[in-house]
Image: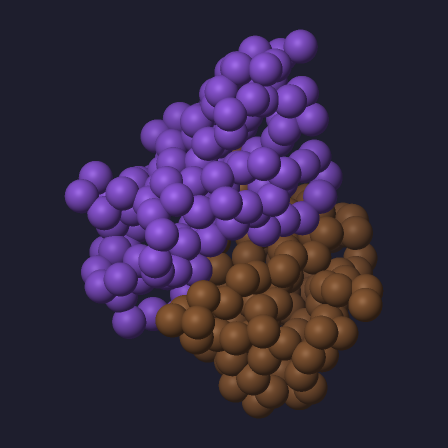
Amino acid sequence: NAGVTQTPKFQVLKTGQSMTLQCAQDMNHEYMSWYRQDPGMGLRLIHYSVGAGITDQGEVPNGYNVSRSTTEDFPLRLLSAAPSQTSVYFCASSPTYDRVRGGTQYFGPGTRLLVL
Amino acid sequence: AQSVAQPEDQVNVAEGNPLTVKCTYSVSGNPYLFWYVQYPNRGLQFLLKYITGDNLVKGSYGFEAEFNKSQTSFHLKKPSALVSDSALYFCAGYGGATNKLIFGTGTLLAVQP
């Protein structure tokens, strides 16, 4: 299994440009999520999905869109990039979204995004 | 509000000495707590988790964590640190009625040879 894969690894955007960060997992996990990591702030949840066709907002959803048309893929779209979106983005998946069953999340390698 | 706190930005320890990385939580209901490790330019890797049962949880690479309900803590420990343990460590947890995982701000562990 490749696990969780993310593309691209690094991207530079100009303010106002749009782009899609790709995330895929081959473990048939029902739960997928996107985080951003900023110095001193840990990881903050952007959006998450508990299954194909179902998405919901996390802590910091503004400026980002997601969709989940298949179990495997969970792309993150930046509609109009801003310098405040400069960050490292991580995608994660889990076999279950049920916290009672203690779903362990598996993380991708990350995408570094620089918005000028 | 649900929260997970890591009070130390950095922990320094000499190789061979025991290490502790601290984590406290504030969640309603039963807490479900995790430790993850991040090596430079890599994604997070799962170390261990507490769901229920024994308060001492054993995980990967010789790490363990002690759940203390009265002190609302979940400190990460290792009896003998290695230089290769140097990394960024995150505590995380679910709580309340949410299925959202909340992360602490991270603690940088530096093990000196």
Question: Furthest-left residue in view?
Answer: B70
Residue A84 seen by the camera: no
Image coords of residue B54 (percent x, y): 36, 52
Query: Residue at the location (44% across, 71% down)?
Result: A101
Image coords of residue B83 (percent x, y): 67, 20
Answer above or below: position of B56 versus B82: below
Image quarter of the N terminus of chain A: bottom right
Image label count: 0
Image coords of residue A54 (percent x, y): 52, 86
The image quarter containing residue A5 is: bottom right
Relative side of A110 to B60, left or right: right
Relative side of A63 to B83, left or right: left
Relative side of B70 to A114, left or right: left
Nearer to us in this view, B68 or B8: B68
Query: Residue at the location (60% across, 87% down)?
Result: A52
Image quarter of the C terminus of chain A: top right
Query: Residue at the location (67% across, 83% down)?
Result: A71
Q: Colour of chain A?
A: brown
Residue B11 seen by the camera: yes
Answer above or below: position of A69 versus A105: below
Q: How is the image coloured?
A: by chain
Relative side of B96 to A17, left or right: left
Q: Colour of chain B?
A: purple
Query: Residue at the location (50% across, 67% down)?
Result: A103
Answer above or below: position of B21 versus B49: above
Question: Furthest-front residue in view?
Answer: B54
Image coords of residue A83 (percent x, y): 59, 47
